Every structure is written in C-alpha cells, then in structure tokens.
Amino acid sequence: MEDVLSDIFRRIELKGCVYFKRDFWSPWAMEINNPGMAQFHVLIRGRCVLEADGGKYHAAPGDVFLLPRGGGHILADQPERDPVAGQIVMKSFQGEHPMFSTGEVSSQLICGHYEYRNEVDHPLLEQLPSVIHIRSFETTAPGIINSILPMIAGEMNAPRPGMDSIVERLAEILLVQVLRTHLNEQKHPRGFLAALSDTRLMKAIRLIHADTGSDLGLDELAGAAGMSRSAFALHFKMVTGFSPHAYLIQWRMFRACELLRTNRLPLVEVADRVGYESEISFSRAFKKILNVTPAEYRRAAS
C-alpha cells in the first residue's frame, strides 16, 4: 500500500523546479516577493542570511531553507543590506552584466521552488512554520541531505541530457528529507506531519486514503487505530489540531478535484467514489469548501 506522504505529493502534483546554482559576490541582497509557491534555498559555499517574518536566519555551507508557503523574504550576505527585487536580479542573469558578479567574497546558492495544486489547503503544508532552517552541522540532519546537494550541484555544473529531470527529482527528494529532519528536531511534535509518525493515527489516515469512497465513521477509523472512539478522537485532535471527520472531508475534496480534472465521469459517479450517497450532498459539501460547484470547477479546469 502506498504510504500517505507519497500519496499526498502525488495528488497535489508536486513538482520541484531549480532556478539556478550561482555565485553571489559581496555585497549582495535580493528580495523575493510572495510567489505563492514553496521556496527553497541551499547555501553551498560562503555565507548567507535569510530575513522573513521579522526573523533573521544565518546559514552555514550545507544549510537548507524551506519556505513552505512561499512568503516574501530577503536573502543577503549579511543583515541590513538594501535588497534588489528578485525579478530584476533574475533578469540580469540573462544579459551581459549579471548583478552581484564581482566583489570581494562569494557565496554560492542553489535556489528553486515547488509547484503544487492548492485548491484545497492540505494541513501538511499549512501547519508548517513559515521558515524551516535545516543546519548541516547538527546531528539530526540526515547524511542523505548532504549527499543530495553535491548531486544537484554536480548535474548543474556539467549539463547533460536529462539534467532537468534529474535535478527536479533530486529537489523533490530533498523536500521529503527536509520534512523528515524537521519532524525529528521537534521536541513535542504536533500537526499532520507528526501524525504520520504516530503508528495508531497512521493506520486511520491510511484507511481514509485507501477507502475514500467507503462509509467511514468514527467507529471504523478508531478500529483501524486500535483505540476506543473517544480516545481516538481526542488523540487525533490533540496531535493534528482538527477532527478525524474534518480530515476525511478534506481528503474527499482532494480526490474529487482530481476526478473532476482528469476524466468526464458523471457527477453522481464522482460523488459515489468519494463517499457521498447523492450528487446533491456531494455538491453541497464541495461548494462549502471550494466556493464553486463541481460543475463550475470542472469547466474551469478544462
């Protein structure tokens, strides 16, 4: 059976994209406005500080920054620099005089983003902090992160056929490892990511993913977890911050969106496949969450 994290990434159509591996010569600073996509930055060499949400995060070589919701931020060689808009910096890379290409000391960065469908906000990403900073020198950072980075850099140093596909896949592996490391570093983990490492909750969540169209209630989910109804409901809410029923509804909407986008099944059959007894009840639940009817969503998606 497919694990839940892989299933989520497949359903939201996660795709990694690497912008560049580039040297920035001091002094340098660029401001990235909110792009609406998860952003990542890896410091390969030199020094770098990221400023976001009023905080400053100083990086050492091998450190990884992940901004799960892509909030606006500044990257610089040191704090309090006057930043140049990221779009201007990126545009200059296409010309004869790229910005920050001369100076005293260089920092090398790999930067990119993750694209994913977000018609329905999944708690996996929504509950993460605005900035995740994985430090290469800490013992909790897995060795695989430090092995992935040279592979990405190596591919970009000497482009060969298939480079883009390899780099995109490596970037997606990097995301999974960053999330794993972030979870391991939490003293008292909470949220959906924490639930994925809870053996009992994982069984119930896996049942939701595997049998979305079934008539799943608290009895079935608690039984899968091997807990009483009351203990399961309380434990699920304490760890994730929402009820089992709320996640069941949310995942049904994920699956419904996928079905509406990818085929021409009658709405009554889509409703049945995601666990609704009638097209009317399905349409009502769908519009409550997405603010459009299933038919309107399908027309827009096509």
Image: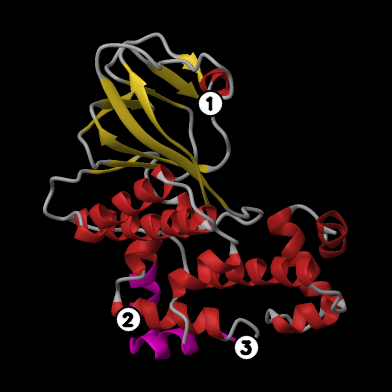
The x and y percentages for residue 82 are 40, 8
Q: Residues within 10 Å of mark 3 (few under 14, many from 20)?
A: some
In this image, 164 relative to 287: left or right? left
Residue 283 lies, in percent from the top left, at 80, 68
Question: Which residue carries the number 2 mark?
Answer: 200
- Residue 216 inside the magenta-drawn segment: yes
Residue contact at pointers 3 and 2, CB within 8 angstroms: no
Q: Amino acid at mark 2?
A: Arg
Q: Quadrant of the C terminus?
A: bottom right
Q: Which residue is label 3 attached to?
A: 214
Q: Which residues lie in the magenta part? A: 215-236
Query: Front-most of 67 and 29?
Result: 29
Q: Position of residue 84 (x, y in %)?
A: 48, 14
Residue type pointed to by label 1: Asn
Q: Position of residue 123 (x, y in %)?
A: 48, 57
Q: Is residue 115 inside the magenta stretch?
A: no
User: Pointer 1: what residue?
Assistant: 33
Q: Which circle's residue, 3 or 2, is located before the other in the chain?
A: 2
